[in-house]
Each structure stands twice: as C-alpha cells, then as structure tokens.
Amino acid sequence: MHDVPESAALSSTAAPAAAPPATAGAAPVPPAAAGTTAAAADAGPAARSPFVRLGDLLAGLAPGRPPLSLAVGEPQHPMPGFVGEVLAANIAGFGRYPAGKGTAEFRTAVADWFGRRYRLPRPLDPEAEVLVLNGSREGLFAAAILARRLAPAVKQAAPTVLLPNPFYAAYGAGAEAAGCTSVPLPLPRSGGWLPDLEALTPELLGPAVALYLASPANPQGTIAGRDYLARLVELTRAHGVMLFADECYSEIWLGDAPPTGVLEVAGRDFDGVVAFNSLSKRSSLPGLRCGFCAGDATFLRAFADFRNVAAPQVPEPIQAVGIAALADEGHVLASRELYRAKFDLADRLLGGRFGYQRPDGGFFLWLDVAELGGGEAVTRRLWEREGLRTVPGGYLCRSDAEGRNPGSDYLRVALVHDLATTEAALARLVAGLA
Ligand SMILES: Cc1ncc(COP(=O)(O)O)c(C=O)c1O
C-alpha cells in the first residue's frame, strides 16, 4: 500500500474522522438502499491515502526510540542477484518508447509462468490474454474505469463497485474515478475474513460493474479456497460483474499448498475475470514497477486500447528483468522461507494475544487492539513509546452505511524487514502493547 511516500505524508492538516465502534458482519447495503449514504462515505478522510492520514496522526509526536517503519508493505528482502546484469544487458531499450501492452517476450513469459504455477483449463494466449502493467496498482485502479465503460446500459444509471472492507486503496480510487459508488462488503472474522457469498444478492450484484477480491488478502492474509472462488466467479458472471482478482501476494503463503488462482476456476474463456499480479511482492522488487494482468480477452482488448492513450508504459529493460524474475523460482522460495521464519517468531511472541492468528499468506499482522483503545490510539502509543510506525486498521476501511468502521479496533503491522530486524521490532511491539 504504497500510495504516497511516507516522508510526503505530512502536508494535510485535516484530522481523521473519529470512528464509531466497529461491528463485525453487518450486511452490505444494496445500492438502491445505500444510495447517497455509500457515496458520502467515499468523500473526505476515508478516500485519502492511509499513509497521508498516518502522517497526520503522528505529526508533531516524537518517536520514543529510533524510528522503524512497519507501515508500508514494501518488501525489504534481498532482490534477485541478476537484476543489475539484466538491466545492463538491455539498456538500449531505454532509447525506445515501450509498446503499451508489453513486449511479446514479456507476455509470453507471463503466460508460461501462469501455465507452470496454476492448473489452468488451457494455456493463456499471450497475444490476447496478457498485458504488462506499471505495477499492479495502476492496473487495478484503471480497470474500474473500463468496467464501467463496458457495462451494459442497464447498469449505467447508478453503477457500483463492490469492495472487500478493508481493501487496497487503489480499488476505491478506481471506483471513484469511474463515477461508481463503492459498496463495502463486510469481512467478518467468523466468516474467515471473506465476503459472505450468500450476501451477494441479485440486488447487490445487479448494479455492480466490478468486484475486487485480494487472495491472499491485505491485511488479514486470508486465502480464498477453490470452491469459494468458483462460486464467486459463477455469481459475478451471472450478473455481468467483472471480477478483478488481486493476486499480488500469491507467492507468499504459509501453508502446505499455494493459493488457487482465479483463472483456474474461470472456465476456458476466462469470461468476466481478470487476475492481477506483480513482481513487487513475489520478487521483492516494489520499485521496479512491473506487474501484469491476464484473463478475459474481450475486456483486455478494450483495456489495451484505453491504456494505449492513458496508462504508464513499462520500459523494455524493466520487462526484461520481469522475464528473468518470472523464470526463477529460487529467490521466490528463499523469500517465502524468510516470511515463514518471521511468522514463526510472531507465533512465539504474540501467540494467543491481540487476536493474533498466523495468516494463510501475505506478510501482515492484523491485531485486535480494541482493549488498548483501538488502532489510532495504539498507533500513537507505539510511535511515542517504541518509535514503531504502524497503520490504524480503520484507515484501510470504509465506513459502512451506518457510519461504522470495521477496522477501527485493529492495527496493521507489515513484516517486511530481515529476520533480525523483525525479531527486534516484534519485541518492541510486544513491549509497546504491554
Ligand atoms: C493488496 C495489494 N494489491 C496491489 C498492490 C500494488 O502493488 P504493486 O503496484 O507494487 O504491484 C499492493 C501493494 O501494496 C497491495 O497490497
């Protein structure tokens, strides 16, 4: 969630809205009923970057110990050793404008990677079913605009975008840019932190142009299982809703088997479904700005046309690094092992406290700090006592139609550092929460 460099997150003076108590499991409000209430929740502090809001929250407060950021989900693991070499070998590519949809070699590498990583119904066609992205964020943002544009007339009067709540900020920004009302879907802990499929009624899906889901999720790390994804595809497809599956944490999993990818259950045409992924988390290359999306060829053809005039291209040398990174699983395995070791530490130091559960995947702790005054109070406390920068959970959520923010009791902590730094950070976290 790297919307704004944290150093730049000090300018605004607006105070974050005070969040009323959270309720888990409130039903999503169909747009006909939500109407202006849901739209109003889009405006003001809720729509601002969580990191800008964090800067405001901590402005003027001195850190109690040398500062350490556990706020931004920016992997600090070693990047693959070949990055410099591949860039150098392809340096001439900086002398050309890159093609918007990506080089044929990059798109083929993506299609091949999907074929190795997932049990797809058939191989992806790199010509029609894959696009390069300047990191997955811009693609996730822009996809909502296209979903709105391509939606049938019947959805155009009051279009909505369905978002998990909490969610990655680009989904909401995309919905807003598309002129759609965001409808937050509750993620109750009792439901495994996933949107309740039974709550995805025809009233809710009817006006929706898109639904976003991240698996593994940020922040809870939930992995949606095969059956869940298959049913979700059925539901969204039946109501003409584009399903945007954010799979950028797909390689950071802590269990025995890798997460299912949405394209595995999307049928032979991948109709109505697009998967987004990136080298930022997989290869610890967040600054490379290299991502990709794959799936529904009709959507991607229109997306490519739109992107040709509106989107950032990805330089060819960057795509060459992407090809090399996708061909190498060694660095991915080493990085995954490092995340596992860090969660072993978290199990030991936090086990049974603050609602801590070892997640299915991803690299965040999602801690229930209601008893200590909630996410904002604890964020201030950890900064002032321990110099730790964390994110109040409420900043990652939208308030529901009743004005309740489901994340306000929570704290997000990114485990992105090396093992020794993480061990020291967790000790400081535990001390700060004591
Ligand atoms: C859930 C989620 N999706 C997408 C992204 C975007 O990553 P990138 O643009 O680096 O691919 C992030 C980054 O933190 C994320 O947490």
Image (spheres, helix red, strand yellow):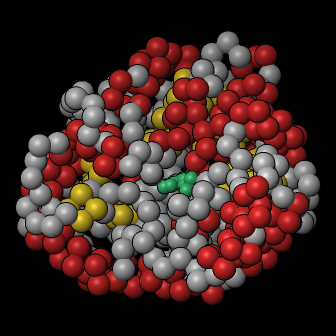
Q: Residue at x 55, y 67 (%)?
A: 285
Q: Quadrant of the C terminus?
A: bottom left
**Which one is nearer the viewer's eye here, 338 or 8?**
8
Question: In the image, residue 302 lies at what x, y percent?
Answer: 84, 35
Number of labels in the image equals 0
**Which one is nearer the viewer's eye here, 301 or 269?**
301
Image quadrant where residue 3 sits: top left
Image quadrant where residue 403 sits: top left
- Is 73 left, or right, of 284 in this rendering? left
**Which one is nearer the viewer's eye here, 302 or 88?**
88
Query: Is residue 64 placed above or below 174 in the rendered structure?
Result: below
Query: Is residue 25 placed above or below 120 in the rendered structure?
Result: above
**Which one is nearer the viewer's eye here, 253 or 303?**
303
Q: Residue at x 18, y 68 (%)?
A: 429
Image quadrant where residue 348 sits: bottom left
Question: In the image, residue 425 lies at what x, y percent?
Answer: 23, 73
Q: Can residue 364 be seen by looking at this rendering?
A: yes
Q: Can residue 267 be seen by looking at this rendering?
A: no
- Is 366 left, or right, of 169 in this rendering? left
Q: Residue at x 22, y 29 (%)?
A: 13
Q: Residue at x 24, y 27 (%)?
A: 14
Question: In the image, residue 301 lies at what x, y percent?
Answer: 87, 40
Query: Is residue 343 placed above or below 215 in the rendered structure?
Result: below
Question: In the image, residue 48 lies at what x, y percent?
Answer: 38, 33
Query: Is residue 250 placed above or below 49 in the rendered structure?
Result: below
